[in-house]
Amino acid sequence: MIYRVNLTIIPLHNMILPTPSSKVIKYLILSGKFMPSLRHLVTSRDKYKPLLITNLGKDGKRITNGERGVINAGTQLNAFIAFSNAKSSLFSEIRGGEFMTPYGEFYIRANNVESIDIDRIEQKIVEYLDKNIDITFITPAILSSKLLLPPSMKEKFKDINVGFSTLPSVGLIVAHAYNLYCNVIGKKEIENKAFKLAVLANALSRVIGYNLIPVTTGISKNRKPRGVIGWIKFDIPYEKLKRRVLKYLIVASYLGIGRSRGIGFGEIKINSNPIYGNRKTYK
């Protein structure tokens, strides 16, 4: 199961939020004040850990750079925490109230908890099967292009620093989503399958349009990797592959994609975008 706890966050005085603004929720978890059972996920160094703590949102946009302006007291902000395989006792820890943090004092309310059963994801897949796959990167996605290397060559090039992709291919996006999916279900030894999936997704996809914008992220003063925001729209005429790709991307729509999802990067949305005109599907 994957769970998403939707939150309302209200600052109790005028303040400048931290960069990234997800640090507010991260601090509350690490300090044991809010959902402390997630602490082990927050501190995990696993690149594909099943956790997304979003940045705080206002007027439909995430605040990744808190230094850009003052947030007034009483402003309603939103965020969510998504995670998988939780213990039942964790849900008793979802308690609202007023919380003091190093960034200021906030009132936090849990609005609801959404869930999706990975074993019953087929219904979601059907919703998108006759549509183009339209992905929006809400916050910068930090995607390593080394995922496209054949596994036999990874050791040879492991010390070469190429940074992160600012023009990701369909295959790179899908490979990152696949690795996350496998981590959620506990599947191991997936390097060869991830590589083959990336090659297939690149070869058998039809890119319809994109508007991808390179950005410099503000993870910390010393860590500012390049990422990408915007959207990409594509289709996969081979239905068997499209079903697999949609399964991995639906999971990513809850848990994000790429690096630093535990502090709000890589948040994505799958949009409903009908296919117009004649289209032949291969099964």
Image: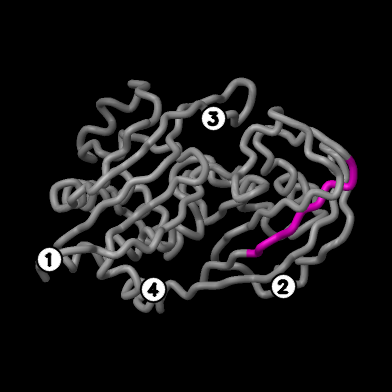
Badge 2 is on which residue? 89
- Element at label 4: helix
Q: Are marks 4 and 1 in contact (CB under 8 Å)?
A: no
Where is residue 241 drawn, in percent x and y?
A: 20, 62
Nearest-to-viewer mark from 3 and 2: 3
Q: Which residue is mark 3?
A: 217
Q: Which residue is mark 4?
A: 124
Point out the image quarter for the C terminus. bottom left
Residues under labels 4 and 1: Cα distance?
Answer: 24 Å
Report if the CB atoms under discs 3 and 1 are less than 8 Å apart: no
| Dot 4 crowding, Cα within 10 Å, few <14, some 14–19, many 20+ | few
Task: Give the residue type that dot 3 points to.
Answer: Thr
Q: Estimate the spatial distance between the alpha carbons at disc 3 and disc 2, rounded to whole Å.
A: 35 Å
Q: Residue at x 43, y 35 (%)?
A: 228
Quote the CA–CA distance across marks 2 and 4.
Answer: 28 Å
Earlier in the chain: of badge 3 and badge 1, it is 3
* Residue 278, numbered label: 1
Q: Nearer the viewer, mark 2 or mark 1?
A: 1
Of marks 4 and 3, which one's residue comes earlier in the chain?
Answer: 4
Q: Give the residue type at disc 4.
A: Lys
Q: CA distance from mark 3 to mark 1?
A: 41 Å
Q: Does residue 183 appear in the picture of this structure?
A: no
Which residues lie in the magenta part?
A: 5-13
